[in-house]
Amino acid sequence: MSSFDVSFEGLDELDGKLKRAIAVMDPAKLEKALLPIAEGFASRLRGRLPLGPTGNLRRAVYAHVPKRGPGRPVPAASAGITARIAPHRHLVEYGTTQRYTESGAYRGIMPKGLYLTEAFRSEQGKMQTELVEAVKSLVEGAL
């Protein structure tokens, strides 16, 4: 029976590179890389929304980094429309049927706009590409 030996060269170098790559994956650094992607989406969403009489719908668009904790340990960045400033956002997005007040006054129909849904659908591929590139540049910068 014959025997053979296997040896690896450069294992220490690989180990060092992997340790540097892991250090780059610090949640704070990842969030810092993800926030511009969320801000870009928020800016494009703001441009798609209709400008109502108060402008609250556009003003309610946000991008931020949510706090990490036991319920959300993964680093992330988020964009959307806050209900605090635009509590009517669902009416603009999904529309209404015929509306009447208690006294019977007709208030019309709000057609659905699907602004957020359409913005997300059209931007999803671009955001995923930007996300991969951001993480890739972080890792390559460490190596």
Image (cartoon, rainbow, N blue to C red):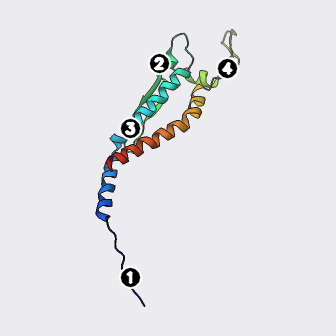
Q: Which mark is residue 111?
A: 4
Residue at 59% across, 34% down: 121
Give the farthest residue toward the front.
Answer: 9
Between marks 3 and 4 in the image, the one whose residue lies nearer the viewer:
3
How far apart in space, not on screen, are marks 3 and 4 (Cα)? 37 Å
Q: Which residue corresponds to mark 3?
A: 33
Q: Which residue corresponds to mark 2?
A: 59
Q: Indicate the amino acid at tag 4.
A: Pro
How far apart in space, not on screen, are marks 2 and 4 (Cα)? 21 Å
Between marks 1 and 3 in the image, the one whose residue lies nearer the viewer:
1
User: Which one is in front, 6 or 105?
Assistant: 6
Q: Which residue corresponds to mark 1?
A: 4
How far apart in space, not on screen, are marks 2 and 3 (Cα)? 24 Å
Q: Where is 21 relative to 131, above or below?
A: below
How far apart in space, not on screen, are marks 1 and 2 (Cα)? 70 Å
User: Which one is in front, 89 or 79?
Assistant: 79
Left or right: residue 18 compared with residue 76: left
Question: Sequence order check: which comes first, mark 1 or mark 4?
Answer: 1
How far apart in space, not on screen, are marks 1 and 4 (Cα)? 75 Å
Q: Where is 11 relative to 99, above or below?
A: below
Residue 17 picture location, percent across and down: 32, 55
Residues at circles 2 and 3 in contact by the CB criterion of under 8 Å: no
Residues at circles 1 and 3 in contact by the CB criterion of under 8 Å: no
Residues at circles 2 and 4 in contact by the CB criterion of under 8 Å: no
Q: Indicate the amino acid at tag 1.
A: Phe
Q: Which element is circle 1 on? A: loop
Q: Where is 32 relative to 21, above or below?
A: above
Residue at 67% across, 9% down: 103
Left or right: residue 26 compared with residue 91: left
Q: Indicate the amino acid at tag 2.
A: Arg
Residue at 36% across, 44% down: 138
